[in-house]
Image (cartoon, rainbow, N blue to C red):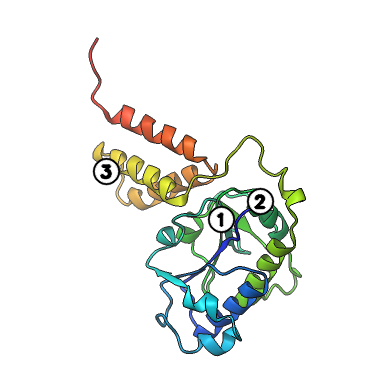
Amino acid sequence: MSGPAPAVILVRPQLGVNIGACARAMLNFGLTDLRLVAPRDGWPNADAGPAASGADIVLEQAQVFDSVAAACAGLSLVFATTVRNRELTRRVVTPLQAASEFHGLPQQGGLMFGPERTGLETEDLAVAHAIVTIPVNPAFGSLNLAQAVLVTAYEWARQGSDQADAVLVNHDGPAPHEELEGLIAAVDEQLARNGYYNPVPGRAAAARLTMRNLFTRPEFSAGEVRTLRGIVRGLSKPRREG
């Protein structure tokens, strides 16, 4: 089995020329689903076309989103690229390992890349299931945005289905991201209703980030997400006296 080609998600990209270069790298290896989150200079961008060097189909079909969560809708397994340690607990894989997992998925996955200057923020990483780190020279780890896209797209293209078939056993892959977001929203709503965030001033933001980390990291299947939603509904109902 060979899974669908992953989407490439560029979070707050700064320069149109870099978006075009990413489109060129994508199409070289058969990726066409480009998703832009709040591009700094808006979209479309006149500088992207020349840099794409003919990868016009990628630019023409590019979608723009206001948030990372919205850009991940319809995707199952989402990997975020970063080289820096963050406060979230996430498993870390190489581009080769990520590509193998994508090929083992029945649904489409996604690769997330951060802004050119700063990379992904903790809140962005909290939406992803795992982290991809490109094993570059530790003394000089300077990759530009298009190069990072190129490396991960190349690894996806060269992976054969034979290697991928053994990646996931008795598991139909992570749930579509919008279903996971629905679970997180349901838990958050119930906690807020019960006053969970009230006792400690300023606790809400940190608590919500921790909760998102807890629900995103395990890569729950769609069935598991539905079960957890049912548990939340069951706990929120008034207790019936016997």
Q: Label 3's element?
A: loop
Q: Which mark is residue 109?
A: 1
Q: Label 2's element?
A: helix
Rate crowding at label 3 as few (under 14), some (14 to 19) or many (20 or more) other CA atoms within 10 Å. few
Residue 86 visible, this angle: yes
Q: Could you tell me how far apart the alpha carbons at marks 1 and 3 are, in whole angstroms?
A: 37 Å
Whole-percent x, y for residue 134 in the image = 69, 64
Q: Looking at the image, is mark 3 or mark 2 earlier in the sequence? A: 2
Whole-percent x, y for residue 147 in the image = 66, 75
Q: Label 1's element?
A: loop
Q: Are marks 1 and 3 in contact (CB under 8 Å)?
A: no
Q: Could you tell me how far apart the alpha carbons at marks 3 and 2 are, in whole angstroms?
A: 41 Å
Q: For the point 52% across and 40% down, which residue is it?
A: 221
Q: Quadrant of residue 52?
A: bottom right
Rate crowding at label 2 as few (under 14), some (14 to 19) or many (20 or more) other CA atoms within 10 Å. many
Given the image, on which type of amino acid does mark 1 rest?
Gly
Q: Looking at the image, is mark 1 or mark 2 earlier in the sequence? A: 2
Lateral position of residue 152 relative to residue 163, left or right: left
Residue 44's place in the image compared with 29, above or below, is below
Name the residue beneath numbered marker 2: 101
Residue 83's place in the image compared with 179, above or below, is below
Q: For the point 54% across and 81% down, which residue is it?
A: 56
Q: Quadrant of residue 160?
A: bottom right
Q: For the point 58% across and 50% down, which residue is it?
A: 90
Name the residue beneath numbered marker 3: 198
Given the image, on which type of amino acid does mark 2 rest?
Glu
Q: Of residues 202 and 205, which is closer to you in this image?
A: 205
Circle count = 3
Q: Tell me the mark number nearer the camera, choosing from 1 and 3.
A: 1
Lateral position of residue 202 relative to residue 55, left or right: left
Given the image, on which type of amino acid does mark 3 rest?
Asn
